Image (cartoon, grey):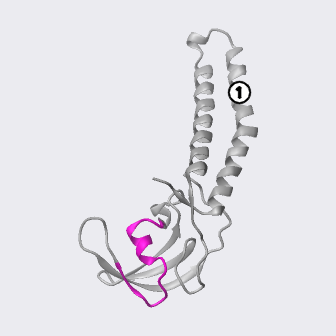
Amino acid sequence: MYNQLTEKDIKKMEEEIEYRKVVVRKEKLEAVKEARAQGDLSENFEYYAAKKDKNANERRIRYLDRMVRTAHVISDESADDEVGINNTVTVYFEEDHEEETYRIVTTVRGNVLNGMISNISPMGKALLGHKVGDRVLVTPEKGEGYYVVIKSIENTDDDGSDEIR
């Protein structure tokens, strides 16, 4: 399965890859050299910790590189009055008589605890392309669906500050 990413997501990932290769890699290698120079490696905790950090950085570089290479690029463009990626949407839950605000993002940026839902989540899929006032049926994978009403749509200025997972 390919990850759906926007051009901005890919650009942010490429910037992180470059930073990790040029800056972080050099720092981690230096830390390993310093720890190795302390002597007996069999009881050298600093050496093992430095190696672990270096390997974690290399894993992150490989992960991001694989994400960029296999990405399915999608557009984050939408009409001003339609729900699209990187829009902040306030919805009214009819059953609960409550309002919630979500930001629709790609899968690598999804973070429900911070109000960011993926464009492929049941709520994200249901909201995309709809307008203020629309009554939308959200259908979870299992179970009955529920209705929400779109109260407002805000075109969020995406500065790329959200963390890529």
| Relative to 32, residue 158 above or below | below
Q: How many marks?
A: 1
Within 10 angstroms of label 1, few (less than 14), some, or many (20 or more) residues?
some
The image shows residue 101, relative to residue 28, as above or below, that is: below
Vertical comparison of 145 with 16: above or below = below
Considering every residue shown, the one lying at the far left of the view is: 143
Residue labelled with disc 1: 29
- Please state which of residues 121 and 114 is positioned toward the viewer in this rendering: 121
| 155 horizontally vs 120: left or right | right
The residue depicted at 72 percent of the width and 44 percent of the height is: 19
| Quadrant hosting residue 58 | top right
Instruction: Say whether residue 157 is magenta.
Output: no
Q: Mark yes or no: residue 161 visible.
A: no
- For residue 70, side relative to residue 161 (left or right): left
> Is residue 94 shown left or right of residue 153?
left
Which of the two residues, 69 or 10, is positioned nearer the viewer here? 69
User: Which amino acid type is shown beneath numbered disc 1?
Assistant: Leu
Residue 139 is situated, as x and y percent measured from the top left of the image, at: 31, 73
Is residue 125 rendered magenta in the image?
yes
The x, y position of residue 110, in whole percent, is 50, 61
> Is disc 1 placed on a helix, strand or loop?
helix
Q: Residue at x 61, y 51 (%)?
A: 68
Q: Residue furthest top?
A: 40
x and y, in percent, of residue 10 in the image = 64, 56
The residue lying at 43 percent from left, 71 percent from top is 125
- Judging depth in this view, the residue of 37 and 124 nearest the camera is 124
Q: Give percent across and percent down for residue 34.
A: 72, 20
Q: Which stretch did the figure color magenta? A: 118-137
Quadrant of the rendered image containing residue 38: top right
